[in-house]
Image (spheres, helix red, strand yellow):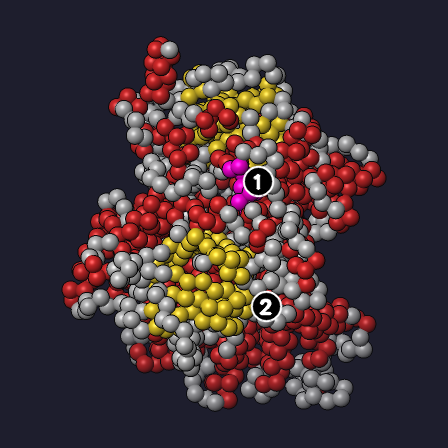
Amino acid sequence: MTAHIIPPLNPPLPFPDRAPLLRAEGLTRGFKGRGGLLGRGHEVLALRGVDFALARGEAVGVVGESGCGKSTLARVLLHLTPASAGRVLFDGQDLARLPRRQLRALRRRMQLVFQDPFASLDPRRSIGDQIADGILIHHLAAPAEAQARVADLLAQVGLDPAHAGRLPHEFSGGQRQRIAIARALSTDPDVLVADEPVSALDVSVQAQVVNLLKDLRTRLGLGLIFISHDLHVVRHLCDRVVVMYLGRVVEEAPAAALFAQPRHPYTQALLAATPSMHAAPGARAVLSGEMPSPANPPSGCAFRTRCARAQPACAEALPELLPAGPGRRLACPPALADLAHGAAHA
Amino acid sequence: MLAFALRRTGIALVLVWLVATLVFLVIHLIPGDPAELLLSQGGVAPDPAAVAELRERLGLDLPLIQQYFTYWVGLLHGNFGTSLQDDHPVAAEIALRLPRTLELIGGAAVLALAIGMPFGTAAALRVGGRLDRVASVIAGVALSVPVFVVGTLAILIFAQKLGWVSAGGYVPLAQNPGRHLALLLMPAGTIAVGLAAVVFRVTRSSVLEVLGRDHVRAAQARGVGPRLIILRHVLRNALSPVLTVVALHLGALLGGTVLVEYVFNWPGLSGYLVRSVEARDYPEVLGIVLAISILFVFLNLVVDLAYAALDPRVRHA
Amino acid sequence: MSASLASPRFHRLVLPGALLALVLLTVAAAPLLPLADPVKQQVSERLSTPSLGHLLGQDEYGRDVFSRIIWGGRVSLSVSILAAACAGLIGTLLGLVGGYFRGVVELMSVRLAEVVLCFPPMLLALLVVTLLGPGAVTLVLVLTILFTPGYARVAYAETLSARTLDYVTAQTALGATSARVLFRTVLPNIAPPLLVQFSLTVAAAMMLESGLSFLGLGVVPPSPSWGLMIRSARSVMEQAPLLLLWPCLALAGTVLLLNVVCDRLRDVMDPRGAAMGVIPGFLRRARSAALPQATTEPAPSLVRIDNLTLSLKTPAGPLNVVRGVSFGVAPGETVALVGESGSGKTLTALAVMGLLPPVVTPAGGSIRFSRRDGTVADLLHLPEGQMRRLRGNDLSIIFQDPSASLNPVHRCGKQVAEAIRAHGGGMTGEGSARAAKAKVVALFRRVGLPDPERRAGAFPHELSGGQKQRVMIAAAVANTPRLLIADEPTTALDVTVQAQILDLLADLKGESGSGRGQEGKDTEGKDTTGMGLLFVTHNLAVVRQIADKVVVMYAGEVVEEGPVAEVFARPRHPYTAALLASAPESEAEELTAIPGTVPSPAALPPGCRFAPRCGFATPACDSTPPASIEVAPGRIARCIRWMEVA
């Protein structure tokens, strides 16, 4: 189905000294498109061959615009949506090949926080019950002790443990997001995947949740995959950043390096387009057009249709993600050529 | 649009095949010997000779595949079987009676839409007002009265007590158009009562829902006048759900004709069906059920296509 | 359950519910009641009128009608309820499993059940009756077969939407088994529509059962049944019309009760479905044009909002959600109105357009606007007809969600042309359509839509989000408005597209001021004709990019106003200062988070609305709301400690 995408195996780990906890190779995920005479069009690929790795205790940000596949990536990494091709290894175990029972047991170690705090809690059950779910499912505590654990978790996320009996609608958006985080922490996970956890919150509350995540990360040694369209938050929270465009990773680098020196033309455009409170208004390079539909991606480099540096060759081959400096990888032949040229001169 | 229409027609044809096959299988699906079952009356075991004869007549003694093949060859030649009672071909009777049933349904639909849509719209535009409250109560009652009760009471009041119309019957259009239409009015009106209530409710809630949509506010922000907003941005969009619900009620509508034709002595397809069921004339029942079901599938196809014509998103999907 | 037991919706359920319970109890207790034998014939007493011994009289065989009604109801209701319960059980299971597992399971469960829907229900019933012969068992079987697919469909659709809900996904992510997810999380959450479906099914089953009995193909005589009673009363309806009436009343009344209970139940379970009982603004009759004309204030250069108060109708009484808001927009100026959700910024903008939602009404203040012809009007008190002439003409607005703002069934060009044609533009008659079309294409080109001729003929769903917003902008600027309001116009868009739209707006504004020669400037060389832009947003960074002046709102009040550069450099209200500091742009290791949450308008702090979250709060802040203070020319802050801030 996707013969033209050959996933390079064993992607180089940016942190070779740290053991890879979660590792994905050549992830591809298609969704059934509509259309055609019989009502079944071709597949629309939300992910087109993504390699990903997370070291123990590392925080990786995944950024990109809507439709780039970042939310799908979050779900495929957790095997909530199975990959159409490629594989996800958690602590060396292929999630797709694990027996159901073992997969469920493994889920204890990887948890998810959603974007919309109003949709992520069951409206009919008390928040204490929902937080206790994880503890009871994995038998982490006797039912009698679960309540104490719930109270402890609520306190950890900065909520009053006395409120465990309340229903979700009695809480504000920010508080619900804390509850959702407490629920995710209930199984004592190694990795937390947060899918746009602050973008649905009030501006004045966002910083609270960002600080909470940062605090939990250092305190619990939690690995974090932080999906966001907000570059500023990612920069604040993450060690490493992965930039996605139309289902593929275009650039990957340590956070500081990426923001200081973006190399992919798309990353550069994304940074330029992000308004800043500190910069005075002025002329900035504005990217033309919009991301093409994933149902009909351009040949070769998907970004070439909007890229100022596009060359005829960009339309031919899918650019490979290649090493570009310490801990960095880049999928743009012209930019890579520049780098090589610069290195040769140095 | 063409691809959409072709696809829908394809699905409809598959459904027709499914329906026909199912109708064919019904007799084989029930436990026991169908011929024996058909001939048994009040627990008395039927005469074995009669059973054997019926088996042969219905072709039940042949292998299933061969029966199925013969069945389809017959269908494709327009052969819907012959009556057990008088050997009359079922297809001929259907051809005679189907137009009368269609006329009934058409009349009822026109009446229901003509009453339900304007009142539904008016009620939504003045939601909570007097018209809205009164009409909603009436619709609630109309929905709760079974169609044969409406028909029977209509005969009692309009035919027996007031003597305005005759209690029922049928005169061919060619023979006396005025009388034909007068006789059509009561049965069609009876079916229309419940349907109009449905149309009223859906129109009302659909218009209310569209009124609250952003694009209506946007049209208002452009300075478009109220009349144009209602026509172009509210009613046009509110039409699709009305159509959907009417389509969903097509089945009930076709069922309603069974009762109404019986009540008013309207010689349509459904009256024929009731008579066949009473006589347990199995081939006749199968033929009629098949004919009406195919009609049902195609009516749904028409609604689907109308739906696509109304909403550009559907035909591009 | 979203509605509490004390809600008025629940109260509306009590009476029909109680009546229905009474009916059910009566028929259930029929054997215990002192009723006459329903099948005992007394031919000598046939068709006798009501008497003490026979409350409703006797039928054509002299049987007691009252007793027959109750015993008949027992048969009808038990058949219907039994069938509805069987169908409910099977259908729910099929739908639940089919919707959750999809794929082959779906095909084998829901899709298979749906084959039944290919037949009109009455016909299928007749077909089965032909084969099995009439009787109560056949009826239950037939009705179960008929109503199972309906249930399966409802359960399937609900499960399908529930399984993608985040809280269901969260259960899977926690490691719960499928059975636990289905029965602990999905089933309780899809129960309300299934319950509604149950009462609906009982009513439908009764209709069908009585119909079959009426045809003589349902309940077998001499067992009483309402359908059968109507059938037999029909033959004697000339002599005894009352005999027909009783079963008709009983049947219709019970179905009506079931339907009413079902409707009310739906309202209780799903409040979204309940009508609001309010008439949209554009349908309201024009307000009395009692204009408070005697104002001594100088005419505003473009628009001046003074002391605007907006009130929200709630079940607990009116609630002022916007209080005492004052600010102005000058020609050629870009004013940003910033605030969080619930701050009242969008309502303020809608009040200027006269497009407030029906539940919000102005409770005080004025919005004075100087029209193109030089006259000044108070937009809060302008009759709807005059307001309409301003909308899309002198005054325009762009909304947040371009996908919802375009009517999906009309072509984009047609919708933009509406703005042109609504305001005449000197075009009438034959040529107007063509002229409007040419203007639309020119506008589309102007807002940067590629291939404008084709886009004009496109339906909204054929365009991307950014393109749709360009279409909305084209409609808004079609009549070169004096004031353009943009309500979060880029929030629904990606950041690279946001940058494009912000540039386009700046561009359009610049163009409106220049190119009009010297007559566009007053004596001081200030721009007097350029388009004013009121930009509503929650994003401070966007404010920094495009606005000249910023108005900060918190909990329905303006807390700070001033030139953008000054406010960003030196905020004078703790809220503004805290917002600026909490933005993740700062290099600090820990973000300065604002504690607490935005107060609900129903429970505002008595003093300063920000005091409970404020680092500068003193006891004085908690007692009385502070007044707006002009802290410098053109700078306003609503804080008693403004001098110490920042």
From the viewer's perspective, is residue C415 above or below residue A83? below
- Residue A28 showing in the rendered view: no
Q: Is residue A253 visible?
A: yes
Q: What residue do we see at 42% from left, 39% from top?
A: A279
* Residue in front for this viewpoint, A176 or A254: A254
Tag 1 subunit? A
Q: Which residue is mark 2?
A: C319
Q: Could you tell me how far apart the alpha carbons at marks 1 and 2 are, in whole angstroms? A: 32 Å
**Would you say B316 lies left or right of C568 here?**
left
For marks 1 and 2, give the one nearer the viewer.
2
SS class, disc 2: strand
User: Which structural element holds mark 1?
Assistant: loop
Q: Residue at x 81, y 78 (%)?
A: C34
Residue C145 bears which disc, if any?
A: none
Q: Quadrant of the N terminus of chain C?
A: bottom right
Q: In this view, which residue lies farthest toward the left?
A: C431
Q: Point out the stretch of residues depicted in magenta.
A: C579-586
Residue placed at 80% from the left, 41% from the top?
Answer: A147
A60 vs B150: above or below: above
**The quadrant where residue A281 appears:** top left
Check disc 1 and report the residue beneath it. Answer: A197
Q: Was residue A110 drawn as part of the magenta stretch in this picture?
A: no
Image spot of residue C484 (x, y percent): 35, 58
Question: Where on the picture, by quarter, is residue B181?
Answer: bottom left
Chain of the residue under the numbered disc 2 shown in the image: C
